[in-house]
Image: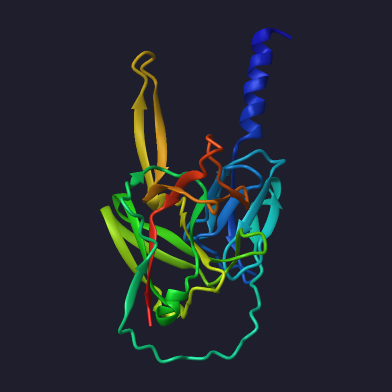
Amino acid sequence: MSKNSLWILFILWNFYAFAQTKGVVVDEFGKPIPYVNIWVENENIATTSEENGEFSIAVSENKNLIFSILGFEKKTVNAANAKQVTMSAVSFVLTEVVVSRRKQTKELEIGKIPNAIFESFDNGPRIDVKYFPYLASYKKTKYIKKVILLTDNRIEKATIKIHFYGVDDRGFPGDELLKKEFIVSVDKGVLKTRFDVTDFNLVVPKNGLFVGVEKLLIDKNKIEKTNTNTNTKQTSIQKKFAPFVLYNFVESDLLFTFSGGKWSRQSNEDSSKNKAYEPAINLLLTN
């Protein structure tokens, strides 16, 4: 066999090994599930199902895909069998809801960084979180009223998810504190946007909580830019997804990233300094 033939076979093998896997995510009744988080297991490759439940991801057929969304059981499916993925709804045990009468006469914003320098960049397919410890001074303003998020959005309106996590026994982000997805939109520009979460009846737990933002890798959030190589004159299309979340470079031992279907602790090249990028998220507390 000639070298040219071998080269063609190599190209074809790569094309089929990493071809686009297309499918749809549905519930037990066949209804499409939008905004499902879809990860290639143990890899930093991900996508999000569209509003009609459809998705597309470049992955070899021998890899596993992890599907997760609040209200449904997490599911792992081989890419070769992901043409239609059915997710089962989680059954929640109803508990007595105690409705307390809020005064909302006091407010306290927490999470501010002194002398903060914000940086905006595309953080790719991952979820970064910010840790909020519990302080005794929060006792009189224990309710979380609003989430404050700083973003740099290059399109008219971008859609994102906001997550609230408890803290597990290892100090990692644990169970989600909400029973359903919290999906919000941000306007164009470099903005500080406040999202009301009063109806969730959230309080700061005694061991603190993590708050994070999940970028939705869907068509309406897509930003495409055509780049031309000045030497070869060949063009390529660069894809990014809005919005860009603003970050602070901070020193902390509680910086975590969700990627490949699991949480990992962020690390810095300089091991003497536990500094890394943390999303610019603040919380507004009330009584």
Position of 250 relative to 25 (above/below): above
Is residue 84 or residue 93 the one in the foreground?
93
Q: 246 above or below 178?
A: above
User: Quick check: 45 left or right of 103?
Assistant: right
Spot occupied by residue 204 in the image (x, y as percentages of width and height): 49, 73
Residue 203 appears at what percent x and percent y? 48, 77
Q: How is the image coloured?
A: rainbow
Work out which residue is located at the far top of the displayed protein and give it.
Answer: 2
| Residue at screen point 53% across, 68% down | 208
Rendered location of residue 87, percent (x, y): 65, 65
Residue at x 62%, y 40% (from the top left corner): 59
- Residue at the left extreme of this rendering: 189
Q: Nearer the viewer, residue 114 or 203?
A: 114
Q: Nearer the viewer, residue 32 or 244?
A: 244
Identity of the residue drawn at 66% across and 78% down: 91
Left or right: 10 with respect to 222? Answer: right
